Image (tube, helix red, strand yellow):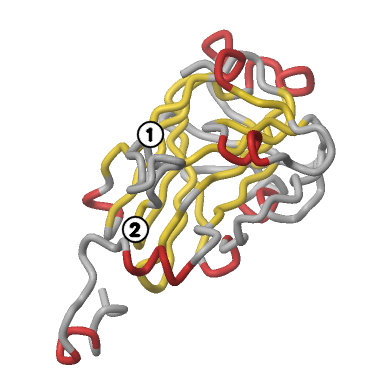
Amino acid sequence: MSQTAAAIALSGQPTQEELNSPFIVSADKFPPNLPWPNISELARWSVSSFKFGFGPECLQDGDPDTFWHSDGPQPHFITIEFPRKVAVQKLSIYLSHPQDDSYTPSTLAIRAGTGPSDLQDVRIITLDKPDGWLTFDVSSEPNEDGEGLKPIWAYVLQVFIVANHMSGKDTHVRGLRVLGPIDLDQGNEEDPFAWSTPQFMMYEHIR
């Protein structure tokens, strides 16, 4: 899905229409103020490769002038591993085509699973010269009331760079945040693989 065709740009405080949009775009260099909780710090972050001084720490340092810079053969990817199964609602990613040109991703595959060996694509995003923070649901499955999309339950999330603009080889990502559901209790009730007995619940956070 093209960013330009489906995105709603933020104008100050997000409206309900903006919050219900599949894609939210903020031209500000800093992360937008959104109601979904930022759960990024719960995870361990790693990347497929990086140039010295441009590692995975640049994805969360809050500085719009720093960025992860891959340094190796394709494919490039960011892996986010949680110590327990969590509900992931959205991703916010900061990309800047005017600054990064052919280093800017043009197609992203969002993958989820219980470990690096069983990741499956849950969302494919196609971008057209993005510049700013793009926030989108990781799932494409509607929730029960039809007013939004379900969260994805996973131990591991991966942002896979499928292609760059102008067939660029290395990639730049200036920021990335993982957002959970607004109502965490409701999210827990929607877990399709929830443990139901005390004996199994004792081990639900062990991999």
Residue 14 lies left or right of residue 48; in this view the side is right
Which residue is found at the position 29% from the left and 53% from the top? 113
Give me the disc on residue 153: 2
Which residue is found at the position 46% from the left and 19% from the top? 1
38 or 109, nearer to the observer? 38
Residue 49 lies left or right of residue 65; in this view the side is left
120 or 194, nearer to the observer? 194
Q: Secondary structure at mark 2?
A: strand
Find residue 19 and report its horizontal and vertical position in percent: 62, 41
163 or 187, nearer to the observer? 187
Give me the disc on residue 123: 1
Q: Secondary structure at mark 1?
A: strand
Which residue is found at the position 57% from the left and 31% from the top? 23
Which residue is found at the position 46% from the left and 29% from the top? 108
* Three-letter amino acid code of the residue under disc 1: Arg
Q: What crowding class fits label 2: few (fewer than 14 Cα within 10 Å), some (14-19), or many (20 or more)?
A: many
User: On screen, 97 above or below 53?
Assistant: above
Find residue 95 and report its horizontal and vertical position in percent: 68, 30
Residue that protrudes farthest toward the top in the picture: 166
* Three-letter amino acid code of the residue under disc 2: Trp
User: On screen, 110 above or below 119?
Assistant: above
Find residue 168 and report its horizontal and vertical position in percent: 56, 16
